[in-house]
Image (tube, coloured by chain):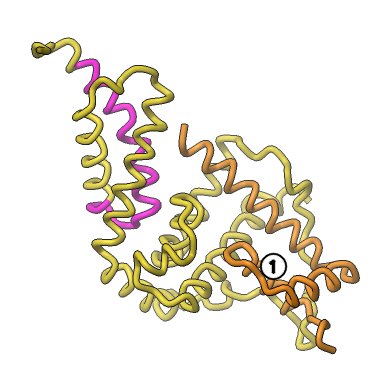
Amino acid sequence: MMRPNPQNAMAIEHQLAEHRAYLLRFARLQLRNEAWAEDAVSETLLAALAKPQSFGNQSQLRTWLVGILKHKVVDTLRQRAREVSLDSDSDGAADGSQELDALPFLASGRFARAPSDWGDPEQELSSHQFFQVLEACIEKLPRAQGRVFLMREWLELSCPEICKELNLSATNLYVQLHRARLRLRECLELNWFGQAS
Amino acid sequence: MFLRRTCKEVAALLIAREDRDLPLAERLALRLHLAACQACPRFERQLLTMRNALRQWRHYSQE
């Protein structure tokens, strides 16, 4: 039988505190609700504490925690599906920036101005500054758009899965994702890729 | 022309392609348009860059 070990407990507490801020950042980005995010992260850390034998390798620990967090976040979205879908009704009307949802086209259906050159699509982008800009752009998406977008891109759910979890129609989901992608493109153009040219 | 698409239609297809499989006829129309257009291949490359960027971000968010 394991005896309580105060030193070990403190070491674990210290490790968890380090990961907490990191987990919270992604939970906030995905859930767009401070209280839900805090709860999801607390549940994640509780689940981790139930298995202290997993506290070995730091980088494995983080990967493992993120995996648990994703499950907790999906549970939250499922439980809050009704509130989440209410946000999606108010998004479009509330922020009054529908022009962001469309690219500029001429009446003929041609681009009003040609899209700019962002360089090699396979370029290395994993710099801290780029990820900061990317996360800021995701954060700027209207709440419901941001949520479904990250369900696709962070939780890596399929569209049918997202529809099922949130009780959304496929058409509604595709419209939201379409708008989210356009806005993200615009934001990255303005704050990252446009700077180079 | 059943295979002719405007840039506006093509842009919508390129965005849709990120989230669902396009019907065969649309894929064909897309190819034909991209081969003949100056602007749309750039837009396609922007979307592919975003796809790549999000993949790298996902990897980073897991570490």
- Residue closer to the observer: A196 or A47: A47
Q: Quick check: A74 left or right of A156?
A: left
Q: Quick check: A50 left or right of A58?
A: left
In the rendered image, the vertical position of residue A89 relative to residue A65, given as above or below: below
- Residue closer to the observer: B21 or B47: B21
Q: Amino acid at mark 1?
A: Leu
Task: Please tell me whether residue A22 belongs to the stretch shown in magenta.
Answer: yes
Q: Total of numbered circles in the picture?
A: 1
Chief SS of the magenta region = helix
Residue at the location (33% across, 54% down)? Answer: A74
Residue at the location (57% across, 72% down)? Answer: A100
Q: Quick check: A133 left or right of A23?
A: right
x then y, percent, for residue A149: 48, 60
Residue at the location (75% across, 52% down)? Answer: A118
Give the residue number, with chain letter if any, for mark 1.
Answer: B14
Mark 1 surroundings: few (<14), some (14-19) or many (≥20) residues within 10 A: many
Residue A77: image quadrant is bottom left
The chain letter for the residue carrying disc 1 is B
Residue A32: image quadrant is bottom left
Give the quarter of the figure containing the N terminus of chain A. top left
Task: Please tell me whether residue A129 belongs to the stretch shown in magenta.
Answer: no
Residue A59: image quadrant is top left
x then y, percent, for residue A166: 35, 68
Q: Which chain is yellow?
A: A
Q: In the image as oriented, which residue stretches furthest toward the right? A: B36
Q: Secondary structure at mark 1?
A: helix
Q: Which chain is orange?
A: B
Residue at the location (33% across, 72% down)? Answer: A85
What are the residue bounds of the magenta stretch? Answer: A10-36
